[in-house]
Image: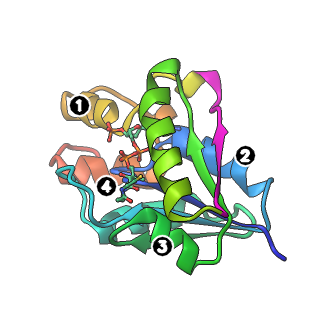
């Protein structure tokens, strides 16, 4: 049985912290889907199509890894993909409460699913999509935290120079 894993998130936008998790996860499974959520209650800066395009470009070259999207319950989607591994990143202790709630609920929906928590490189511990958007909008340079396509799309979105 191939080990199929899903790494879900909003990816609004994908950062190098997320990419670090993708690289680690791809070494643990036979196939990895990076699943862009299409139904979050969050207000997104980028459309699902834009978020998928950024993920697709960012993961190019990482073996047996592809972008995907889902609508509705994550547990049902993971089941329909015949995946048995759910990847989540744990950056700090503050992530744990929410992550444990999600993991227990997903296990209830799909008992064969194992949630695997991976720790990103310490450089990315305090990184989030919101913080990179905020500082980019104010003109800071955040290239070291973002794939090049994301830098370009953020500058275009916020109508900043140097597109
Ligand atoms: N590097 C950088 N940032 C990271 C990160 C990492 N390794 N890991 C998490 N983050 C950040 C994200 O950038 C994001 O920041 P933001 O809030 O500023 O945008 C934040 O941490 C949380 O992001 P993410 O891990 O993508 O979670 P999410 O809350 O955006 O998405 C879903 C969670 C979509 C997976 C979840 O809501 C879901 O499954 N929804 C479907 C409905 C469902 O089934 N609900 C029940 C679940 S039990």
Q: Which of marks 3 and 2 is nearer the N terminus?
A: 2
Bounds of the magenta segment: 112-122
Residue denoted by label 3: 77
Residue with the mark numbered 1: 134
User: Is the distance from the Cβ of mark 2 to the nearest ligand 1 atom less than 8 Å?
Assistant: no
Image location (x, y in percent) of residue 98: 41, 35
Instruction: Give the number of the mark in front: 2 or 1.
Output: 2
How many angstroms separate mark 4 from mark 3 (CA)? 28 Å
State the CA–CA distance, disc 3 to disc 2.
22 Å
Mark 4 or mark 1: whose residue is earlier in sequence: 1
Picture residue at 56% right of the left edge, 65% below the top: 110
Q: Residues within 10 Å of mark 3 (few under 14, many from 20)?
A: some
Q: How crowded is mark 1: few (under 14 residues within 10 Å), some or many (20 or more)?
A: few
Q: How crowded is mark 2: few (under 14 residues within 10 Å), some or many (20 or more)?
A: some
- Which one is earlier in the sequence, the residue at label 4 or at label 3? 3
Q: Which residue is drawn at 61% across and 61% down?
A: 111
Measure how far apart labels 4 and 1 are at the Cα level: 14 Å
Q: Earlier in the sequence, mark 3 or mark 1?
A: 3
Residue 147 in view, yes or no: no
**As rendered, which of 55 and 118 lies closer to the eye?**
118
Cβ atoms at labels 4 and 1 below 8 Å apart: no
């Amino acid at each position: 049985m191939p080990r199929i894993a899903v790494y879900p998130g909003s990816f609004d936008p994908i950062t190098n912290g997320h990419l670090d998790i993708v690289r680690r996860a791809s070494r643990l499974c036979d196939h990895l889907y990076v699943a862009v959520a299409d139904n979050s209650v969050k207000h997104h800066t980028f459309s699902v199509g834009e978020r998928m395009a950024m993920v697709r470009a960012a993961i190019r070259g990482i073996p047996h890894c592809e972008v995907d999207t889902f609508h509705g319950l994550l547990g049902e989607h993971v089941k329909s993909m015949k995946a048995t591994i759910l990847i989540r990143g744990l950056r700090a202790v503050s992530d744990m409460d929410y992550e444990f709630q999600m993991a227990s609920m997903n296990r209830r929906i799909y008992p064969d699913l194992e949630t695997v928590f991976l720790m990103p490189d310490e450089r990315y511990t305090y990184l989030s999509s919101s913080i990179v958007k905020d500082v980019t909008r104010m003109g800071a340079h955040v290239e070291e935290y973002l794939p090049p396509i994301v830098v370009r799309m953020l500058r275009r979105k916020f109508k900043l120079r140097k597109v």
